[in-house]
Structure formats: C-alpha cells, structure tokens
Image (spheres, rainbow, N blue to C red):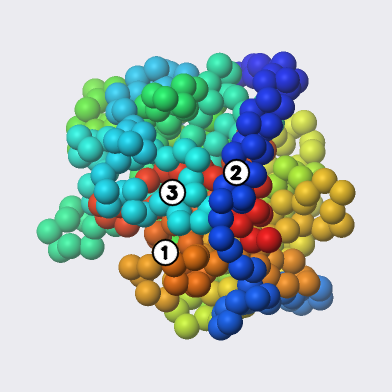
Amino acid sequence: MKHRGRHRRRRRGQALRATLAGTALALTAAATLISTSQATGSGSPGGLTALGTASRTAPLRLHEKPVDLDSLDRLTKDMGGNVGVDGVLGSADHAMRDEAGCSTAERAALPVEPTATRAYCWDEGDERTRQWQPRSVTTSGDADDDGHWGEHRVILAGWTHRDRQAAAPTRDRGLARVAFVDATDPRALRYSWVLLVAPRDGGRDFEPVRSALDGMVWYQDKLIVTGAHGSGLLVFDMHRILRAGVDSGAVGRVSGGYSAGGYRYVLPAVDAYQPAGGTCTRGGGIPCFGSLSLDRSSAPDSLVAAERPAAGSERTRVWRYAYSTAAYRTGLLADSRGRVDAAEAYETKAAGVSGVLAHTPRGARGAQWYLGQAPEVPTRHGSIWRQTEDGAEAATCTADRSHACWGLRTGSLSYWQETGEVWTLTRAAGRRALYAVPLSAVDGSLE
C-alpha cells in the first residue's frame, strides 16, 4: 500500500498542535493541583532503577519465529487476497457515540484530571461488545508519522472475550479481535470488527488466536500484540487482511470456503517473538508481557513494554526494543540472527501497571516514562505517573487530594505524535469509553 506523503500535512499538523497546546494551557490554568513532592501520604513509586547488568536484562531477550511464507501465501490466495484497511473501514457498520451521547456511567469513567478533550462510547446496539472487554489501543499515528493510513485516520482497539460464566461457549473464551475505527471525521467515528487468527495445515486452514490483548502497537505495516497469557508477542501484516466468505459460528475452513465465527474479516499471524528463556511467569524471572506502546522520540523508533502485573508484586519492569531500520524488515524488531535484546530496561515500584509510554521531549537528556496504574480498590479511578531515574510525579485530585485522577480501569496507552494526544480506553462493563488527552495536559497536571 502506498501511503500519502509524510510531509504533506505539516502545516495542518502544526495548527492542530497549536490548538491542542492552547487547550492544555486552559486546562492547566483552571486546575487546582499540588505536586507529589508536596502531597502528604503520596504513595509515590519514586525514581526508576536501571537494570544495567546483562544478567538482569537477559530474561527480556526474545527469539523470532516467523510463520512459513508459503503457508501465508496459500491462505491469502485461497481467501481472495488482501482487502486492505480501506476495505474494512468501507464496511464499518457501527457508529460510536460522542461524549454527549455517552451514558452517565460511561462519562463517570473518564479521567478527573486532566480531563479528556475527546471521548467516544461504543455502539449500544452492537451485541458483540457484550461478554467482551476492550484492553488496548493503537492508531495510524503509530503506523505513520503523518497520522494517516492512506486517506484515513484510524484507531485500533483490541478486545478479548472475558465471560467466565459456565454457560458461555468454551470456543469463545480468550478469543482476540480488533475494532477498526474510522476516525477521519472526528464528529462521526465508525468501526468494524476483524478476528485475529493463526494459519494452520500449511495455510489450508486457520484457527483463532487467544490472547488478553493487554498490549498492541501498529507500526508501519505490522501490528504487534501480546501473545496468550502474555508469553511473547504475535505479529500481523496489515497487507494480509482477508475476507471470510461463509457466515457461520465456526472459525476456519468449512464447506464452501472459510468462516470467522460470524465476523467478515480475519487477520492471520505472520511472525512471533517468544521469550528466549522459556515460558514467562508472572512475578518471576521471565516477564509476561502487559502493556505495549510506540516511542517515536527514540532513535531508532522503539517498542515500549511493561510486564503484566502479578498479584502482590511491589515492582514492575519496563523496557524497550529497537525497531529494525532494514528496508526488508518493515515494522519488525531489530534482531541479530533471530535474537532481539532489550535496548533499555528499568524497574519501577509502581505496581499494577496497566499502561506504559516513553517519550523524550525535545532537548531533554533522556526519556520520561508514563505509567497508568490501577488502584487497589477496583471501583476507584487509576493514577498516571511520570517517572525518570530522578523521581515520580502524578496529578492530585482536588476533591480528595488522592492520585486517583486517571480513567476507571484503563487499558494500554498510545501517543499520537502528530496531534500530541495520548489515547486510552476504559474497560469496566457498562463504563467503556475511548478517550484522548493531550500529553501537554498530562504534563501540566503534574507540575
């Protein structure tokens, strides 16, 4: 797919950033905050601790295991070829509601400080949002630095089937799917579903991918998501979105063609990264992947990760892998004969991390790390911390002087560099919303 020029909209992007900056200043001026250094009983996680030795970063090493290209080509051919992101968006049949159309409960899940500048809620009539939970988000701002994929602005939201009731169909549990949201017109967002699958039988068939989708990043033409139980990463090629021609409850090859459990489209895995030391263990030596995000401010661009929270754990590792700069490895991580090592790694005392970002402001010596932290009480809002090796800061809500100012049960974080927005979503049943906050407003609320 040929993207539009990356510099064509630079003036428009500058104007948009100026507007957002003005909004951020207004929010900062209106906010009544105190910094964590002034707060009493702040519960601050303090500064990051670098994992400097090879023995401490070795558990973060990955081995790449690509899917056989011939099997992918066979499946692509048999299913009629790539329909493309445009094909999926062209059939988007679900309209999102803007903040005014969200319910009182949905709006209550939005952040207290800083406030969301854009918020949307899912189609109330979409039965496929029931018994499922949104967990992660990425955008065409990750895919290309001009913020577009072709003619569209796009948001991808990762959902997993979370119904634990005995009556729920076993085949659905743990299934992973992605909502492709056409965000070209910010006043009228629409979406369609794509099921994640893995080729089997030499490309003659496919099976569903099962993952909590805690993390997801769309970079260039590849989508990287967390694997089953957080053990490794799976890679999908956006040039291989395939149409399922048979509408049935089955997933895979059926009489008359291919079925995707009632979904129109499937996205087959093309590659995988697995922990070099074996299966991950939550709270153990080999971390299970949790949140993912993209950092365009690093050189080269990098995939940022946090380990999946473990019950009772008081420390969490955060780290990054560099993306490859080789033309033949678009959207894939840098490797040395199939091996991928962490380019940078830290430990934080922030437990229950649900989202992670790393960003280096212009002129700064190092990256600032932003961590979305789940509260100890699930019914309360979470916190968002900005950490460096020197310390940590968080907004303090004016109502109760706590740090529970972020959204309610939020998922991963995604920074849209062109617009300066941080995107995330809330996942509590009946309180699910997709929202954006300017990163400048996040920073303003911490100072």
Label 3 is placed on what type of residue? Leu
**Residue 345 found in image quarter:** bottom right
Q: Is residue 220 left or right of residue 177?
A: right
Residue 334: percent from the left, percent from the top? 75, 47
Looking at the image, tell me whether mark 2 or mark 3 is earlier in sequence order: 2
Q: Provide the residue designation for mark 1.
A: 381
Looking at the image, tell me whether mark 3 or mark 1 is earlier in sequence order: 1
Q: Which mark is residue 26?
A: 2
Callout 1: helix, strand or loop?
loop
Residue 178: percent from the left, percent from the top? 41, 39
Answer few, some or many: residues within 10 Å of disc 1's Cα (few below 14, many 20 plus, some between 14 and 19). Answer: many
Q: Which residue is depicted at the point 39% across and 17% down?
A: 90
Q: Is residue 84 left or right of residue 321?
A: left
In the rendered image, the residue lying farthest to the left is 167
Marks 1 and 2: which is nearer the front? 2
Q: Is residue 353 visible?
A: no
Answer few, some or many: residues within 10 Å of disc 2's Cα (few below 14, many 20 plus, some between 14 and 19). Answer: few
Residue 290: percent from the left, percent from the top? 52, 61
Q: Which residue is depicted at the point 30% across and 41% down?
A: 102
Instruction: State yes or no: discs 1 and 2 in contact (Cβ < 8 Å).
Output: no
Q: Is residue 229 above or below residue 199?
A: below
In 3D space, how far apart are the residues under numbered discs 1 and 2 (Cα atoms)?
A: 23 Å
Q: Provide the residue designation for mark 3.
A: 425
Instruction: State yes or no: discs 3 and 1 in contact (Cβ < 8 Å).
Output: no
- In this view, the residue in front, 131 or 203, is 131
Label 2 is placed on what type of residue? Ala
